[in-house]
Amino acid sequence: QVRVVESGGGLVQPGGSLRLSCAASGSIFSIDLMGWYRQAPGKQRELVASITSASTNYADNVKGRFTITRDNNKNTLDLQMNSLELEDTAVYYCKVIVRFNSGGVQVQYWGQGTQVTVSS
């Protein structure tokens, strides 16, 4: 089993910054992808940013404002969010796609989510 835990959410004014962190633990052989997603009230969950060994991907509406970083040794993922806007308000979820052995199937896990509220 894999445990995915997010932290770092909170209340911030427009234009402010927050840093989210995610840690994955368990009997993991490898992590193929780590990513941040968010879900605002009444909306579908959407990709914010994701990272693999080959590439980093950002949603258009966060490019230039958010930066995703990964520590492969610690199985952690951070999201630095700058110039936050009201529209960034959402529950932010961390997703990991792991393998439990070499050549094994990919399995996806989600964290419980952390609330980010941008408000004046």
Image (cartoon, helix red, strand yellow):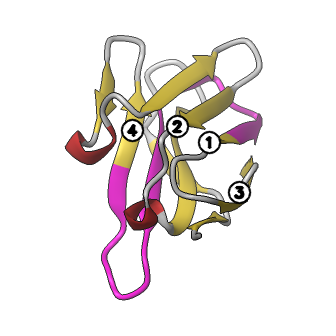
Disc 4 is placed on an element classified as strand
Front residue of this view, candidates 71 and 59: 59
Residue denoted by label 4: 49
Badge nearest the viewer, 2 or 4 = 2
Q: Position of residue 13 (x, y in %)?
A: 61, 59
Q: Which mark is residue 102?
A: none
For the point 49% across and 67% down, the residue is: 89
Q: Secondary structure at mark 2?
A: loop
Q: Nearer the viewer, mark 2 or mark 3?
A: 2
Q: Is residue 110 visible?
A: yes
**Label 1 sits on residue:** 17
* Disc 4 from disc 1: Cα separation: 16 Å
Which residue in the structure is indicated by mark 3? 9
- For label 2, the residue is 82
* Nearest to the observer: residue 88 or residue 43: 88
Magenta-colored span: 21-47
Please say whether residue 31 is one of the residues in the magenta stretch.
Answer: yes
What kind of residue is marked 2?
A: Asn
> Which dot, 4 or 1, sits closer to the camera?
1
Mark 3 falls on what kind of element?
A: loop
The amino acid at mark 4 is Ala
Left or right: where 85 falls relative to 120: left
First in sequence: mark 2 vs mark 4: 4
Q: Give the image location of residue 94, x and y in percent.
A: 57, 50
Compute the Cα span from label 2 to label 1.
4 Å
Does residue 34 show up magenta in the picture? yes
Counting residues from the N terminus, which is met first, the one under dot 3 or under dot 4?
3
Task: Please give the name of the residue rendered at 63% of the width and 32% of the height, measured from the top-left corner.
Answer: 78
